[in-house]
Amino acid sequence: MNTLEDRVRAAIRATAEEIAPGGIPPLSLAAKLQRRWPGPAGLARGRTGWPRVLVPLAAAASVVAVVTVSLALTRPTHSPALPRARHLAAGAVRLGAAPAYDGGIVPQFYVALEPVPLSGSSTRAVVRATATGAELAVVTPPRPYRVFTAVSAAADDHTFVLAAQRSSDYDGPPSDNLQKYFVLRLDPADHTARLTALPIPGEPASQVVDEALAPNGSKLAIALGAGRRGGYEIKVINLRTWSVRTWRGSGGSSHMIGEVVQGADPLSWTANGRTLAFEVVTGPYGSVPGHEIRLLDTTAPGGSLWSSRVAVRLGSDAADAMITPDGSKIVVPIVTQTTREFAEYSVATGKRVAVLGIRDYRHASYGGWPLLFWADSAGSTLIVYDDRPHGPQLTKTGEPDAGVLAVVTSGRFTPLPGTGEQGAW
């Protein structure tokens, strides 16, 4: 045995002696989960960052098996040094500290699906600090999955659901086209982020319109469609009992669940996980579309999508609507010839009650559509994604970088620092 081997063996023994018996607890996923991203056409979506485009289980699953995942961790150049976790269980990586945003009360963390340069795929889910945009942790899809396709968030700022699939090729084998769902749980006290599998069947990625995690983490909604003239359905999975309910509606030429604006999200929840708001595009095929925001009571009997209540009707100048967590308002970006507004409508009356912010672009070069990612309980503060005032710029990888993340409140539009990646809060 040479000197190097002696030193290695001694180091291993010393480290082992530091671990007390029973010091590493058994792996488990908290039974109670606690609380959304856009991209190229054809990719699944969730109210989050880049590409964001069930049958009952045979037996109740009381414990979610923790999968050993392929995880990557990077130390960002401009973020604080990552603290040392007390232990790193299988499927976990170290999580850096996130400073609070001093311009208002917004979540400290968000998760962005980082796109591969010049590609619609995302092979990394990046945990970032809202206040600085600093990279705090990175996870990659567990094998055999290769790409993430969507992310949504619970309101606790610690729980996220990610969708992954084996291939970004939607024309490939059916097995490569299924989305598998995972929970990403942040534990700031232990400085860890852990990815675990949800025991629910995968969904055909080409059929997924959107998915949304309820703010209280109790339910996951998945909207599925078969094309403009096909049928639509919304599945709601109870993540505590693993029961599944499905609501269906024919598509036809007058109604479809989905977005007219690329990257917009048709699904959003109230805080109690009872009411699901979904956006319906209306009007004959080929006409100028209108929009309805419908409210689905997920605790009421029935299975028809179109029996849901119409809360607000909007024109073609509005898209990407979101219900406020308290259920009182619908927040929606509206684009006119000279402005873009973040307006609020009363759920009770369907009438406009407030405008949170207006951006004048008579003398600027805007091209895309503003997107909503987060609202506080009453909708007085928003996190949005919008164009830069002077049009697209190119990133170092040669991709267009047209957007900026911002906090909107009381008529103020305050850009957030960092990469500008869209994400889930």
Image: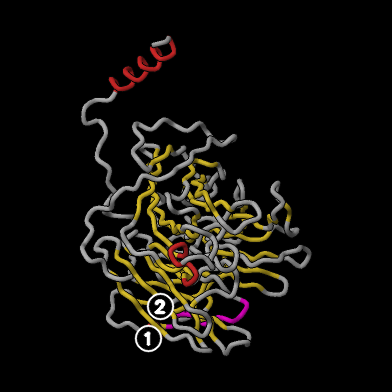
Camera-side mark, 2 or 1? 2
Look at the image and say whether residue 312 sits in the magenta stretch.
yes
Look at the image and say whether residue 33 sits in the magenta stretch.
no
Residue designated by label 2: 233
Horizontal arrangement in the rendering, residue 211 relative to residue 404 (left or right): left
How is this picture coloured?
A: secondary structure
Which residue of the protein is positioned furthest toward the right in this rendering? 363
Element marked by disc 2:
strand
The picture places residue 115, in percent across and down from the top left corner, at: 58, 53
Query: Which amino acid lies under the numbered mark 2 shown in the image of this protein?
Result: Glu
- The vertical placement of 95 against 156, above or below, is above
Query: Which amino acid lies under the numbered mark 1 shown in the image of this protein?
Result: Ser
Residue designated by label 1: 307
Picture quadrant where residue 289 is located: bottom right
143 or 255: nearer the viewer: 143
- The vertical placement of 28 against 61, above or below, is above
The picture places residue 312, in percent across and down from the top left corner, at: 49, 80
Callout 1: few (<14), some (14-19), or many (20+) C-alpha neighbours within 10 Å? few
The residues bearing labels 2 and 1 have C-alpha atoms spaced at a distance of: 13 Å
Can residue 389 be spotted in the picture?
Answer: yes
Callout 2: few (<14), some (14-19), or many (20+) C-alpha neighbours within 10 Å? many
Q: Residue at x 34, y 48 (%)?
A: 67
State the extent of the magenta-drawn residues as a range. 310-317
The earlier-in-sequence mark between 2 and 1 is 2
Q: Residue at x 62, y 56 (%)?
A: 119
Count of picture labels: 2
